[in-house]
Amino acid sequence: MAKKKILNKKSIDFLEKYLNNAAPTGYEWDGQKLWMEYLKPYVDTFITDTYGTAVGVINPEADYKVVIEGHADEISWYVNYISDNGLIYVIRNGGSDHQIAPSKIVDIHTKKGIVKGVFGWPAIHTRSRAKEEPPKLDNIFIDIGAKDKDEVEKLGVHVGCVITYPDEFHILNKDKFVCRALDNRMGGFMIAEVARLLHENKKKLPFGLYITNSVQEEIGLRGAEMITQTIKPNVAIVTDVTHDTTTPMINKKKEGHLELGKGPVVAYAPAVQQKLRDLITETSEVKKIPFQRSALSRATGTDTDAFAYSNGGVASALISLPLRYMHTTVEMVHRDDVENVIRMIYETLLQIKKGDTFSYFE
């Protein structure tokens, strides 16, 4: 018999609203407020910090603390230079891809509100066929329809304004979620759904659960680095996205074989504590939750690293959601994988006992 679907209409409505809201690195607070509003019925209290990380807490009085974590920010651009003829040049805020920029519509965030613009590009008729110049960080530019620099500045645009893409959520072929910023607002969404399931199924945990939506992952895991010092957890289960490697131009010998619809990806890496990882995989096998494996050299490149190496060492694991077209405006995930990440975290939490050290020496 097929498993009951986890996501309901309320879940999907929240996901759409949450994804469609812009939350670039350093400017996550509006998205965090939406997330906290959704999570509020399922937690006892909240913690927030100076830079905008939000944490919903169940059993805040407990000494033993378990974190489940995703990150809230999305890649974006900064206004870096405005030319005399009113064209805007940019620098990255996170890992924004310059190759997808030409012909994209953008939102420039100013104190006067959103100013619309486009990443312009020379027409094909005017480009040299003998020496085609590709998009590069120093030649892409934004046109907001202003005649000169003064007109740009009168609209409220100045150096340092943040720029996002307005592409919104939609569903392809019934079960593929597509949007910008699935990396990694899907993580915040999935851990919120874990909290919902715990509440609806009336599960009582023998520890404090810290549902953590960190900021500033895209520029160096900074939000997780800060909040782990505040929480001082005993255990951290981090969720992020990873690459579906079945699309063209990806080398499986280098990236491994990972595929949409085949289940969450469990990471193998030095930062991943082996006993905690084994608890996750063994629980998934018992509960018949499909999963894939990925080997990561040195760092995971996710908030797992920030948690694992904090506070004298925190038992940490990484569960990733397979995703196509990372750091583009058409990131894609499979609904079944989303539900199975939620199941995997939920079922693993029910197996963790108060005081578990996950020590190799016991």
Image (cartoon, rainbow, N blue to C red):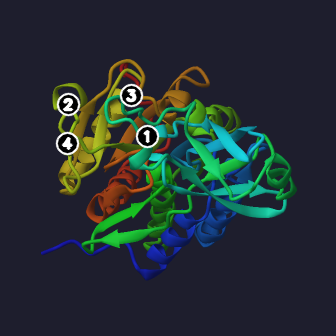
At mark 3, the secondary structure is loop
In the figure, 226 relative to 122: above or below?
above
Marks 2, 1: nearer the viewer: 1
Marks 4, 3: nearer the viewer: 4
Asked if the residue under mark 2 is in contact with the one under mark 4, i.e. CB atoms within 8 Å, the reply is no
- Alpha carbon of mark 4 to alpha carbon of mark 1: how far? 16 Å
Q: Residue at x 52, y 40 (%)?
A: 96
Q: Position of residue 319 (x, y in %)?
A: 36, 43
Sequence-first disc among 4 and 3: 4
Horizontal side of 176 relative to 251 (left or right) equals right
Question: Dot 3, how many residues are within 10 Å of its Cα: few (below 14), some (14-19), or many (20+)?
Answer: many
- Alpha carbon of mark 2 to alpha carbon of mark 1: how far? 20 Å
**What residue would you read off at disc 2?**
251
Sequence-first disc among 4 and 1: 1
Q: Position of residue 40 (x, y in %)?
A: 64, 69
Amino acid at the residue labelled 2: Asn
Total marks placed? 4
Horizontal side of 72 relative to 283 (left or right) equals right
Residue at the far bottom: name it.
9
Amino acid at the residue labelled 3: Gln
Asked if the residue under mark 1 is in contact with the one under mark 4, i.e. CB atoms within 8 Å, the reply is no
- Alpha carbon of mark 3 to alpha carbon of mark 1: how far? 37 Å
Closer to the camera, 279 or 166? 166
Question: Dot 4, how many residues are within 10 Å of its Cα: few (below 14), some (14-19), or many (20+)?
Answer: few
Marks 4, 1: nearer the viewer: 1
Closer to the camera, 76 or 258? 76
Amino acid at the residue labelled 1: Gln
